[in-house]
Structures are given as structure tokens and as C-alpha cells.
Image (cartoon, coloured by chain):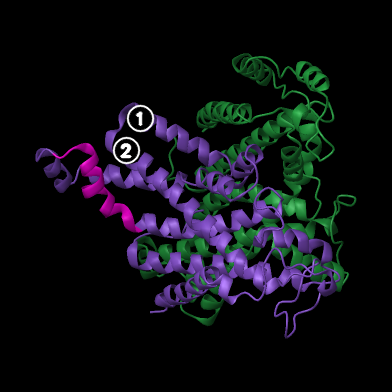
Amino acid sequence: MGLRVNLWLGGVLFVAVVIAGVFAPWLAHTDPVLDANLMNAELPPGEEFWFGTDAQGRDIYSRVLYGARISLTVGIVSQLINTVIGVALGVSAGYWGGWWDDFVNGLTNMMLAIPSLIFALAIMAILSPGITSLLIALGLTNWSYTCRLSRASTLSLKSQGYVQAAKILGYGDARIMFTQILPNILGPIIVIGTLGMGGAVLAEAALSFLGLGIRPPYPSWGSMLSDARDQITTAPWISIFPGLAIFITVLALNLLGDGLRDILDPQSKARTA
Amino acid sequence: MLSYIIRRLLQTIPILLAVALLIFVMFSVIPGTFASSMGDDGRGLLDAEVIERMNREFGLDDPVHIRFAKYVWQLVQFDLGHSFRSRQPVSQVIYERMWPSLQLSFAAMLFAIVVGVPLGFVAAMKPGSIIDMGSMVLAVSGLSLPKFWLGLLLMYLFALHLGWLPSFGYGDGGLRHLILPAVALGVSPLALLARTTRAAVLDIMNADFVRTARSKGMSEARVIRWHLTRNAMVIVLTTVGLQFGSVIGQAVVVEKLFAWPGLGSLLVDSVSLRDIPVVQGCILAIVLFFLVVNLLVDVLCAIIDPRIKYT
């Protein structure tokens, strides 16, 4: 019973963040980048500036709204890339076996040995900062769990009667993988994908915080926090709201993932990573 | 057991080599070298002549395959090369930064285990209770908190506002400097451990052998000690091992925030300076550490749980 609370709360919070991002131009009071005014620098939250202003006198409320666009884009798109890579490698490795399976296994083991944030950081070192680079860095570094799961499920499905029947009917390999295997392993993959999106939002914020993701003046929550550190004694509210925004977004995705798991993947136990 | 340990150690070699190759290839495809990016700080590029001399000095004008052959040959001799920036041997630079990093990671993990495991245990003992609900809300929140934000808030509250703890730096290496970064870093493994412990304990409580033990009149205390703890420990330990990977990864951000002189801040600084040998060395050191921790965890699991057979 209590399980559905996850799904609803997560869903409502997530929709709220999406609305904030999509309708940012209408909801925001000022332009997030251009409306700097040093006369208004470091004002505490009040009637005109709901969340206060930062060191350049920009409205933090507007910047937080626009920040949702970057976080959601990076979170959703990079996790989609991860999922496609993980599923493609995992299903094909499980289905074909042989040297390809060995190769994919080796690749997955290597990926599991490198902490994904470290790997993403190394990729960001090569590419120039920006949203495309972030999508590449985060999209290529977090597919190992999806891959392992898809491979294991494919291995167990391969011997099922309906897959054998499809083979006898002369279905091609690609068709079997898409129409017979994929629909049956989709549930757990959606769960991992949702939880991974939360991870990607956190990773984007971390990289931007380190100055390797979205660079100022663009309103990424991570880079806003990196600016805020210097003003924590004089203007703590600059640190509060972007962090709160990250927290709410990731919380929404985690709750949503947990709720979806209860529905789509009831046998599974606690998440391992 | 010994042969298992040796075999596992040998298995780490191809993984390390693959990581070395991967990192090498990645940093070979970037346009520009350390020398040409040195002028990238807004003061204009260096003279073409200087760039050329530096490239020659660092061996950067060799063809890629020769550079990789040299790199692997050095690696086999445990030589990680020299830092472009400080010209010190990379192994020495890493050695200096390793201890603070180990301190921080282990302290964070210790905090996570000491708080997270009992929390999950208590929650599982009374499923559906207020304690259970409360600790699981805390756990999902802990998983969603950005570490550097939590670190900032802790810094503000305990260092700047209350003045109880130093706000950043390594100090003399004492405990007081370690507390805030370790707590910031430890919160998400704590949350995950609480959830894993709870799930594991609930699972074991419903297992047949626990019902048998109870029905033959074993006291609850003995059931918990003999059946529950040992079985749950294996699952908890495995999670701890896997979590070390993400702790080391996240340590980068926390170290940077608290100006902690560990491998993570070294890595970030070297990445922005394109000090490639140091970047490569840091990543290899981190991967090696992670592999060794997981090997230790597997061995511990085998000692605790005789059902696990490694042959």
C-alpha cells in the first residue's frame, strides 16, 4: 500500500520540475544570464527576488528555473544513450554468445572498475565544456549495469519456447531480439534507467561544480553552487536554492524509480549501486 | 583460498592494462598537447619554437604507437612517467596524495557502516513501523543529496556558524579536519547500506532456516546472532565493496570542496592543466584501489560464509 506513495510523490515532483524547465521563459522574472545588476548584488530572498540575488545581482529564482532545463536535458538524454548502449550490447552478447559475448563481458568489467564520475571527468578533460560534451561524457560511462542485466535476462529468455518458435518460423536475429526478447526485459531496464537519470543529474551538477561541465554564466545548478561557495558567509541563500533544486529533482527520480520497480520488477531486491 | 586470491590478483592485470590503453587512447586523440594548452590561460599562446621544444622534451612528437609502447614498457616497470608540470615522478606525486585520500574514503565508509547498517537492521525488525518509515525516508533523501551541497551546508553550520570544526583543509591530519568531509562523503553509501541491510534482513527473516530455528525453540537472540547476522553480513559486505567505487568517484568533488589534499583534487587540477601523466596515474591508482578493495571483500565473504566456494 505504502509503495504507491513513492510513485505518486516522485511523479508529482518530477512533473513540477519538468514544468519549471519547459515554462522557464514564462515563469522567470528576468533573463538568467543577461540581467546582471551589481546594484542588486547579494540581496536576501524577498518580495522582488524570491530566492534572493547572487554576487552579480542576478535573480536566483529565474536562474534556478532555467537550470532545470540543463539538468533535465542532460539527465534524460545521457541516460537514454546509456540505456541504448547497454541494451544493444547486453542483448546481442547474450543472444549471440561466442567471442562477441567475451568481448562485451571484458568491456563491462573494465567499465565497472572505473568509477563512472572519474571516467566522465576524464572525458570532459578532452572535450570542451558544454552541454554536448556532458551528454557524451555521461552517456558513455554508465551503461554497465543495464548491459549486465540485459545480458543475463537474454540468456535466460533465449531457451524459452516462444523464442525457439520464432527461430523455427524463420525470424531474423534482429527481429527476434526486438520483438521477442526486448519487450520481456523492458521493466527492469526502465527502473535502472530512471534511477540512472537521478545519478546523471547529480553527476552533471558535480562536473559543473568542478568547473568541467557547464561553465558560468550559464545557469547550471552545479556551477551556481560553485560560485556560491565564495559567498557562503555573507549570502548563504545563494547556496541554498540551487542545491535544493538538485535535491528535489534527484529525489523525484529516485522515488519514481523505486515506485516503478514495485510495479514493473517486483522480484528484484535492493539496488546494488 | 590462496590460489583463488592469486588468480583474482592476476585477473586484475588485464583490467588494469585495458584501462591504461583506454586512457592512453583517450588522451592521444585530443588536439593540442600540454605545451600548446599552457598558453590557454588568456595570456596568449607560447611561441611555436617553445612548444616544439617542449613537445620534443616530453616525447610528445613521437608517433602514437611508439608513445604507447613506451608507456606500457614504463608501466611494466612500475614507472608512471613524470609530471609535465612539476617534473616529479608521477608515482611520487600520487604516493604523497594517497594517504589523505585513503583516510577520507575509509572514514566515510566507516561512518556509513556504523550508522547505516544498524539503521537498516532496526527498520527491518519492525517493518511498517514509524522507525522503518522514517529511516527509509532518510535513506532515499540521503541518496538524492548532492555531496558538495551537503558539504557546503555542513561547512556553513558547523564551521562558520557554530565554529565547532575547521571549515576546510587537511590541518595536521587530525580527526577534526576529517569529520565534515567524511560525513558529506559518507551519506549516500550510508543511505544505500541502510536500504540493503533492511532488504537483506527482511529476506532472511522469511527464510526457511529461520523458521526452522524458531520452531525448534531457538531463542530470538540466538536466531539473530547465528542466522541473521552472518547471512546479512555477506550482503552488506558486498555492498560495501561496490560502494567503494562510487565513494572514490564522489571523493573528487568533496576533496575539491574541502580543499582536501587527496588524489581527487590532484586529478581535477591535473585535468584542467592537461598534465596527462598525472591524470593517467591517478585513474590507474584509483582503479587498482577499487579492485583490491573488492578482492578483499570477496575473501572476507568467503571466510564468513562457508557456502561460498571458490574453485
User: What kind of secondary structure does the magenta stretch mostly adopt?
Assistant: helix
Q: Which chain is green?
A: B
Residue B47, position in %: x, y?
Answer: 83, 24
Front residue of A213/B284: it is A213
Q: Are marks 2 and 1 in contact (CB under 8 Å)?
A: yes
For this view, does B100 lie left or right of residue A143? Answer: right
For this view, does A33 lie left or right of residue B50? Answer: left
Residue A127 within the segment the image draws in magenta = no
Q: Can residue A6 be seen here?
A: yes
- Pointer 2 indicates a residue of which chain? A
Highlighted magenta segment, given as a residue range:
A171-187
For this view, does B164 lie left or right of residue A4? Answer: right
Sequence order check, earlier mark of 2 and 1: 2
What mark, if any, has residue A92 been given in the picture?
Answer: 2
Q: Which residue is mark 1?
A: A100
What mark, if any, has residue B84 been given in the picture?
Answer: none
